[in-house]
């Protein structure tokens, strides 16, 4: 079973620092990363900057389509208004089917704001206490959702690289 985690940081550079910590944990084989991306929302900007962490992830990463859809629903759709309401409903329904529900999207949308950053990561096989210890010095808020094996499989089928 995989875990989609969102670690929110109160600073613009917190997610990048966390990404470096995560790289170290991967090298020590304390966690497996299927895919990861960062969101940085600089003060004074209307929308955040997103970036997939390609050099961190294992073979079989979801690719840009998954992150593009997820980030679009979280950060950009509310800005676009009702013009694409039906399409938004279909997209959020598809994500709900794979374990990412409206509550998760709403919570991330409310928490990740201008002036802070977030690390989004799909993981498995974590040595939880060691991972927790590695992030102890980096103030963050953890938002996460666990995915069943079926949900993870459906996500890979829908968004996996061919």
Image: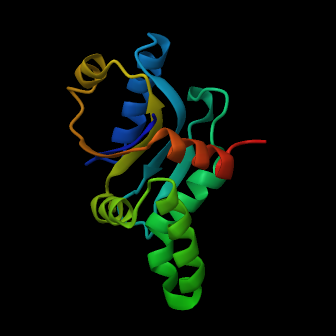
Q: Residue at x 38, y 66 (%)?
A: 102
Q: Where residue 82 sits: x, y (%)?
A: 51, 89
Color scheme of the displayed model? rainbow
Asked whether, in this view, residue 54 is left or right of residue 24, the answer is: right
Q: Where residue 119 sits: x, y (%)?
A: 41, 42
Residue closer to the observer: 36 or 117: 36
Q: Where residue 149 sits: x, y (%)?
A: 50, 38
Q: Is residue 41 above or below residue 47?
A: above
* Quarter assignment of residue 142: top left
Q: Is residue 87 above or below residue 33?
A: below
Q: Residue at x 68, y 44 (%)?
A: 160
Q: Where residue 61 sits: x, y (%)?
A: 63, 36
Q: Residue at x 28, y 59 (%)?
A: 111
**Total numbered circles:** 0
Q: Residue furthest bottom?
A: 83
Q: Residue furthest top?
A: 28
Which quarter of the rendered picture does the N terminus lie within?
top left
Q: Residue at x 43, y 22 (%)?
A: 125
Residue closer to the observer: 147 or 22: 147
Which quarter of the rendered picture does the C terminus lie within?
top right
Q: Residue furthest front?
A: 150
* Quarter assignment of residue 113: bottom left
Residue closer to the observer: 93 or 129: 93
């Amino acid at each position: 079973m995989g875990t989609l985690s969102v670690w929110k940081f109160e600073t613009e550079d917190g997610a990048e620092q966390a990404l470096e910590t995560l790289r170290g944990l991967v090298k020590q084989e304390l966690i497996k990363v299927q895919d990861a991306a960062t969101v940085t929302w600089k003060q004074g900007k209307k929308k955040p900057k997103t970036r997939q962490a390609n050099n961190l992830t294992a073979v079989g990463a979801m690719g840009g389509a998954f992150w593009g859809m997820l980030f679009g629903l979280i950060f950009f759709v509310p800005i676009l208004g009702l013009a694409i309401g039906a399409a938004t409903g279909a997209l959020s329904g598809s994500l709900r089917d794979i374990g990412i529900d409206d509550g998760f999207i709403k919570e991330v949308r409310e928490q990740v704001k201008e002036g802070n950053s977030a690390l989004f990561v799909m993981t498995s096989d974590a040595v939880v206490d060691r991972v927790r210890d590695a992030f102890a010095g980096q103030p963050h808020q953890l938002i996460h959702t666990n995915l069943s094996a079926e949900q993870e499989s459906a996500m890979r089928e829908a968004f996996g690289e061919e």
